[in-house]
Image (spheres, helix red, strand yellow):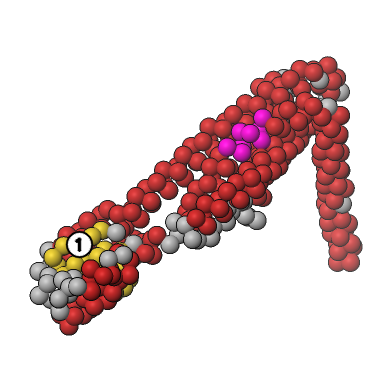
Amino acid sequence: MPRRRTVANTARRRQLKGPHPPRLSAWLAQHRKSAGSTLQQLLRQPVATLMTAAVVAIALALPTALFVVAENVKALGGDWQPSAAVSLFLETGIDETAGAALKRQIADDPAVTSVELISRAEGLTEFREYSGLGSAVDQLIANPLPVVLEVHLRPSALEETVLEPLLSRLQSMPEVQFLREDAEWAQRFEAMLELLQSGAALLAILLGLGVLLVVGNTIRLEIENHREAIRILCLVGATAAFARRPFLYSGAWYGLLGGSLAWLLVSAMIWLLEGQVAHLASLYHTSFALRGLGPAEVPLLLASSTLLGVLGSWIATARHLGIADAP
């Protein structure tokens, strides 16, 4: 009796497991066939396909190029934040010993990374080298320059809520004659970079909606051209998912082709401009190379464009297909 029960249970499990792999294989085969047939159909009309993909590519290339510009500007100004500093010019009666004590006091502030003391002699040497007035400096009887403290700030200290109180504390010290705020440039740079990134995000949203409209309108025309075939499918009992599938793959191919063309357009723009950028950087005695889309950003662009294509075709089929959904 237990043996019969075991055999029956085994047979029941086989019956439960048996249909699923063939059903899954058939489902995957249908998707492969639909994807391949829609791609072949698009390739049979290359001009129309290329025009739609080109419109999608231009819509995607604009925010992508702006994103690349923002990343290059960020890389170009990457050294600004660490070099953001406040120069404290001490009173003339403060010597290097008192300046070193004040340096240790300021270095304990959590908003400060380091403090550099520039002695009077060092300041005079720098002034002689960079001012071009070496002969006039040599005529000086006494060194008129004060002790200077270069206070290097943390990136978090560039926020206005942190920077303003810090500057007030430094200015109110009795040893400080006046200060020069070099961190203001880094603060302005951060504001410009945030504006550029926000503009890229807003442009991506607006042009992403444009991609939805372009793909949706193209799929709507394809639905109208295949209206009779859709009616025949409806008569033989086709589900909405089966009738919708080739149009979804068409939208996916449009999005993927458009994303690939957008990548090529942005890469071509970088290739055309990198020589001029390198020449401009050499005039400032520095080196800078334009950066394109990275290995993680290219798949993101292609996946986003494909998703937009699928979403646009889904909206078009939901509105114009005319077949009731089936479970």
Q: Which residue is mark 1?
A: 179
Q: Which one is nearer the viewer's eye here, 192 or 122?
A: 122
Q: How far across and down, in percent of the image, does residue 238 sit?
A: 82, 27
Depth order, front residue of 280/316: 280
Compared to residue 127, the image places residue 57 above or below, namely above
Q: Looking at the figure, which quarter contains the C terminus?
A: top right
Instruction: State how many labels appear.
Output: 1
Rendered residue at 65%/56% (across/down): 295
58 inside magenta stretch: yes
Dominant secondary structure of the magenta stretch? helix
The residue range painted magenta reads 55-62
What is the x, y in percent for residue 12?
85, 54
Q: Where's residue 118, x and y in %?
A: 26, 75
Q: Is residue 153 left or right of residue 144?
A: right
Quarter where residue 173 is shown = bottom left
Give residue 105's quadrant in the image.
bottom left
Callout 1 secondary element: strand
Q: Say whether residue 153 is visible.
A: no
Instruction: Give yes or no for residue 231 being in the magenta stretch.
Output: no
Q: In which quadrant of the rendered image does the N terminus lie?
A: bottom right
Q: Amino acid at mark 1?
A: Leu
Q: Residues within 10 Å of mark 1 (few under 14, many from 20)?
A: some
In the displayed structure, does residue 284 sit left or right of residue 131?
right
Residue at 12% in and 70% down: 91
